[in-house]
Image: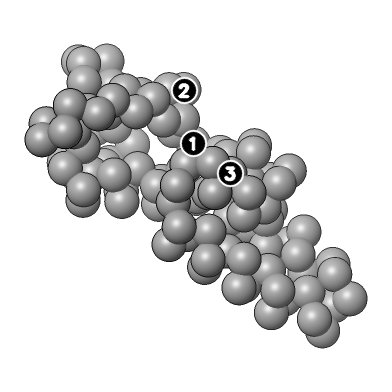
Amino acid sequence: MMVNLTNSNTKDVKQVKVGFSWTTFFFGFIPAIFRWDLKWFLIILIIEIIASIPTLGFGFSVVGIIFSFFYNRLYINDLIKKGYRPSDEESKKILSERRFEF
């Protein structure tokens, strides 16, 4: 399910997926790079490295699976803190149903 968010100051519009992040599931920290979400890129990368050392690389996959359940929520919350708001009523309804505060 996709929502549209608009920054009222810059007029920048972002279309963001709500819910499970398949891209994070399959690619770990890489989707954060493409979204220019440097904070979560570094956090996920560091946790994946730390988890991989004692598990001989297996922890890398586990961290990606765990973050795939809530990465999109973290990303949307960061956008809302930066001034993004729902662009349309459908997006507002979806975010309200998912208990986002804007």
Residue occupying the point 11% across, 31% down: 8
Residue 99 locus on image (x, y percent): 27, 41
- In terms of sequence position, does the residue under pointer 1 or pointer 3 come before the other? 1
Distance between mark 2 and mark 1 Cα atoms = 7 Å
| Mark 3 nearby-residue class (10 Å; few <14, some 14–19, many ≥20) | some
Residue, x 31% and y 51% (percent of image)? Answer: 78
Given residues 48 and 70, the one toward you in this image is 48
Please state the horizontal and vertical placement of residue 49, each as a whole percent of the image: 70, 74
- Residue at image location 64% in from the left, 37% down from the top: 22
Distance between mark 1 and mark 3 Cα atoms: 15 Å
Task: Report the Cα–Cα distance between label 2 and label 3.
Answer: 17 Å
The residue under label 3 is: 31
Q: Nearer the viewer, mark 2 or mark 3?
A: 3
Left or right placement of residue 20 versus residue 53 in this view: left
| Residue on which the image places disc 2 | 1
C-beta proximity under 8 Å, tags 2 and 3: no
Amino acid at circle 3: Pro
Q: Are marks 2 and 1 in contact (CB under 8 Å)?
A: yes
Residue 97 visible here: no
Looking at numbered disc 2 in the image, what kind of residue is underneath it? Met
User: Element type at marker 1?
Assistant: loop
Give x and y (percent) for residue 62.
Answer: 74, 62
